[in-house]
Image (cartoon, helix red, strand yellow):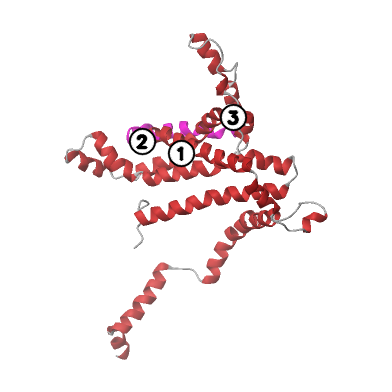
Amino acid sequence: MSDEKSLNTPEGLKEDRGGTEKKITGIPRKRQLALLVAPSAIWLIILLVLPLITMVTLSFQKSAFGADSDVFTFASYINFWQNSAYQNLLMKSLWISLLVAVFSIVLAYPVAYFLAFHAGDKQGLLLNIMIIPAWTSFLLRVLAWRLILGSNGLLNTFLMWLGVIQEPISGLFYSVNAVVITLVYIWIPFAALPIYVALLRIEPGLLEAASDLGARPWQGFFKVTLPLSIPGVLASFLYVFIPTVGEYVTPALVGGPNGLMIGNIIWDQFMRGLDWPMGATLSLMVMLIVIIPLVIMAKAAQQTGILGGKSE
């Protein structure tokens, strides 16, 4: 009888409900959860945290070799702030990355839009066709653009054959234009995927409702489709912008002296100049300059609710 009363009381119901919830949820114990998280945590520590600590320590060393490796100094950071060439090259790299990200999104958005709303049964086939170029070697794709943009390349030869130009266009190869064109080509498929996923999440009923309320197709796009796809656009921007800042293979192959980026200088500091402290300093400065705007953007997105949630 007492057991029946205890179950009928609010406390009894609360205890019984709590026990039922624990059984239903099946949340593992702390030790089990730690075992599940441990492999990923160890992997991140080895491949991310320890290299980052090594880079920070290296940037304060006078040299990476010999007796000077035990001497700690701010010389590399002072050199960075006093040398305008490093700062100008970093700003140039950020500008090139911004251009590549913007052009990639502008060209990828129509592709993602067509795949999401007009591809129909051929959606999977067209999606695979878009991704197929990424299956080939990154280096081969960059080298292909050397053959296209060169003075005697396919593009100049074709334009001269048509009579559009009388002599090869020299500004296409070994320039910033060549770097931007090549990187945009490489990143378009990757920029289209987040936008494509964001467009798939849009309920068709919203567009139908906009049409019933008298909105024209272009009005429905700008009032409904585009705002709801902004999370995908932001993801595409970050997905392209962040790795492009540290790019060094593409500028080295198609950029020439005029298309160098900060990644090329970091490579030279480590591999040719053997000035590892300066290379580590440049790497950390690039990371900080990229992270700060990202934090600001994430905070602004959280405040405005553009990513689906708004902080109170």
Q: Left or right: 251 with respect to 293? A: right
**Separation of marks 1 and 2 at Cα, in angstroms:** 12 Å
Residue occupied by mark 1: 191
Q: Which kind of residue does numbered mark 2 sit on?
A: Tyr
The secondary element bearing badge 1 is classed as helix
Does any portion of residue 223 appear in the rendered image?
A: yes
Q: Position of residue 21 (x, y in %)?
A: 38, 72
Front position in the image: 248 or 68: 68
- Category of crowding for the residue at label 3, using alpha-carbon neighbours closer than 10 angstroms: few (below 14), some (14–19), many (at least 20): many
Q: Quadrant of the N terminus?
A: bottom left
- Category of crowding for the residue at label 2, using alpha-carbon neighbours closer than 10 angstroms: few (below 14), some (14–19), many (at least 20): many
Q: Are marks 1 and 3 in contact (CB under 8 Å)?
A: no
Picture layout, residue 263 above or below residue 119:
below
Mark 2 vs 3, N-terminal side: 2
Instruction: State the extent of the magenta-drawn residues as a range.
Output: 112-138
Q: Position of residue 26 (x, y in %)?
A: 44, 68
Mark 1 vs 3, N-terminal side: 3
Res 258 label: none
The secondary element bearing badge 2 is classed as helix
Res 142 label: 3
Picture layout, residue 201 above or below residue 37:
above
